[in-house]
Image (cartoon, coloured by chain):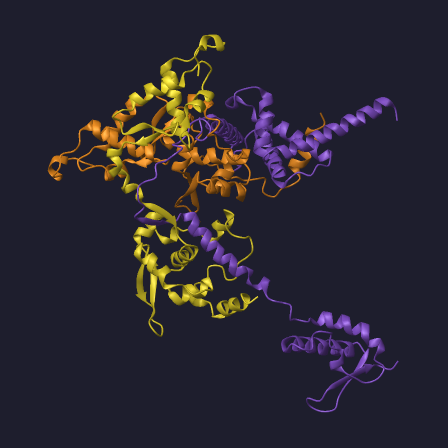
Chain colours: A orange, B yellow, C purple
Amino acid sequence: MSADPEEKSLFEAPPIAEQERMIEAMLFASTEPVTVAELSARMPHGSDAAEALAYLRRRYEGRGVRLVRIGDAWAFRTAPDLNFLMQKETVESRKLSRAAIETLAIIAYHQPVTRAEIEEIRGVAVSRGTVDQLLEMEWIRFGRRRMTPGRPVTFVVTEAFLDHFGLESARDLPGLKELRAAGLLDNRPLPGSLALPGEEDDEPVTGQTELFED
Amino acid sequence: MSADPEEKSLFEAPPIAEQERMIEAMLFASTEPVTVAELSARMPHGSDAAEALAYLRRRYEGRGVRLVRIGDAWAFRTAPDLNFLMQKETVESRKLSRAAIETLAIIAYHQPVTRAEIEEIRGVAVSRGTVDQLLEMEWIRFGRRRMTPGRPVTFVVTEAFLDHFGLESARDLPGLKELRAAGLLDNRPLPGSLALPGEEDDEPVTGQTELFED
Amino acid sequence: MSEAEQSSAVEERLAAEALIVDVDGYEGPLDLLLMLSRTQKVDLRRISILHLAEQYLAFINRAETLRIELAADYLVMAAWLAFLKSRLLLPPDPTEEGPSGEEMAAHLAWQLERLQAMREAAARLMARDQKGRDFFQRGQPEDVMRVRKITWGATLLDLMQAYARIRTHDSFRPFVLDRDHVFTMEQALERMRGLIGYAGDWTDLSTYLPEGWGADPSRRRSATAATFAATLELAKQGQIELRQSGTFAPIAIRRKPQ
């Protein structure tokens, strides 16, 4: 941003306390998170938005509003422990189906992930409406195509998703490290091929009827 | 408000610092200035909104935002000396018009494509303003001339376009199959699906003008 | 029927109904397997896949005896589990190709564990503080002075929806053709069959045109063509005779004398 402010600018950068005030004003004025780059662009030459942000964040620790990071952007949000005061502001959110919630979680934890992979994990087809709903809420978006046969599109979660769930980044998803360590986020193919009893001969069926005489 | 909090409430009032936090959060999240009476009503029994408000006001003195009185209600406002920072936030983003987005979509999916071909696919004339707007945004540019009578210019999408939509190349655009899977497209089979516009005859345009005579 | 018999019949019916509800409640065979695995009351890593396979097959069999229609994927899974079970029970055949029963079982256990983990992750995610419910954004964003620069934006979704709209629009075209001015041969035939009984003597074909189809040229054309085609059909069936005195002369028809 400003490796050499003195050389680049004719004017001296404002004192850091002043920069803090500026960021405070800009972030207070905005509903949406503002990126560091945008903050810098609006501040006088030679300012160090990142440093000022660090100070400001400390200043708001324990206050009624907090400075939170969402991806590359920052925003003020009220402290969650005060939610009881906020009935008036509460917005009625659309109830998500269980399928939608699971699909969302799978996209968040496995991203970028293809539709086929989501279906493999859940063991059922993903309905069009589910993906559509999540796209519309802007919690997921299309990611890069996978460089595999058919070049399927992938899904990833958005900044709006992070903002909604108070996450700094997708790396901060609860339990992510443990899941990864346990190998539960791997993409493990079935050993060999998924050979169902190819000819579907009668054997399994007779086997079954014997079994069920309990 | 609460001359005798101890007598009125079974519970002890929260410490004044805590009351300050509450007011901070309420004023921050509220869509309108809030009166002291309303703040009190939302706070736990025994709280003294007026006193907490006075503390809070002092706390924000000299900061980037200030606590200001509007009528008999209170709200946060940017410190007037920082108004210059709000200038840049004057960037207003608007959605492209339907004509523009459709034209853009056709160029992206069919590039290089001539104006006549765009009109053929959309079934309506493309206004000069629409193309100019897209050119000005630098999302499209002129491509090679088509080696057909009249040598019409073609349009293609730009790097800036790919950048904006997070695409590596125009080939990364989700295909019809994926549009359908995402529920964006009716399940009906499409005539000729992604046939290049050049291969279609004039019929669609005439067919449509008839259509709209109803 | 004794009382005991009656009550057991009722119980059976209730059990059957409960099962229907259950089958509806599962999101596919993997979900059902995961639920069944809970009865083993062990860590998913220590689960007996053989036992689980037996539980699943028993469930499917019960559903079948109660004539509950199961979706195909439940039956596919049943077949696969029966196959897996045979592999687990029989000593490994060195000539047989493909993964061993143990490998397949381990993979299934891992799939169940992964699904369970995702369920828990989803629950943890939803239990987080959420915007608009637990924490809030600025309620009164400050209107920034003067709006000067307008950036025109669109999302990839907008772009795709626009394209989808155009393409879908195309596919609708054949279905919205204006059919008001078309009189079909089927309609004409229907009409002629009703009238032909009265046509004892030679009558001009044009008098058979349906009412209201004579004025507008395109309607008259369509009705004439359809009616003419219908008379040819009736003549072929031997019900009427046609006569025309010369090229472009009026065509007359009459009922074929018996």
**In the image, residue A5 lies at what x, y percent?**
14, 35
Image point 40% across, 67% down: which residue?
A: B116
Total residue callouts = 0
Where the C terminus of chain B falls, by quadrant?
Answer: bottom right
Outermost residue, top side: B7
Where the N terminus of chain B falls, by quadrant?
Answer: top left
**In the image, residue A89 lies at what x, y percent?**
46, 30
Image point 48% across, 8% down: which residue?
A: B7
Can residue A151 be seen from the camera position used here?
no
**The quarter of the displayed image where residue B103 is located:** bottom left
Image vertical order of residue B21 relative to residue A141, above or below: above
Image point 29% across, 21% down: which residue?
A: B59
Outermost residue, front side: B71
Position of A107 compared to A35: left or right?
A: right
Image vertical order of residue B114 relative to residue C109, above or below: below
**In the image, residue B126 lies at what x, y percent?**
40, 63
Q: In the depicted view, which residue is nearer to us: A178 or B12?
A: B12
Position of C170 compared to C214: left or right?
A: left
Image vertical order of residue B19 relative to residue A153, above or below: above
Q: In the depicted view, which residue is nearer to us: B31 or C12?
A: B31
**The quarter of the displayed image where residue B124 is located:** bottom left
Can residue C117 be seen from the camera position used here?
yes
**In the image, residue C68 lies at what x, y percent?**
71, 36
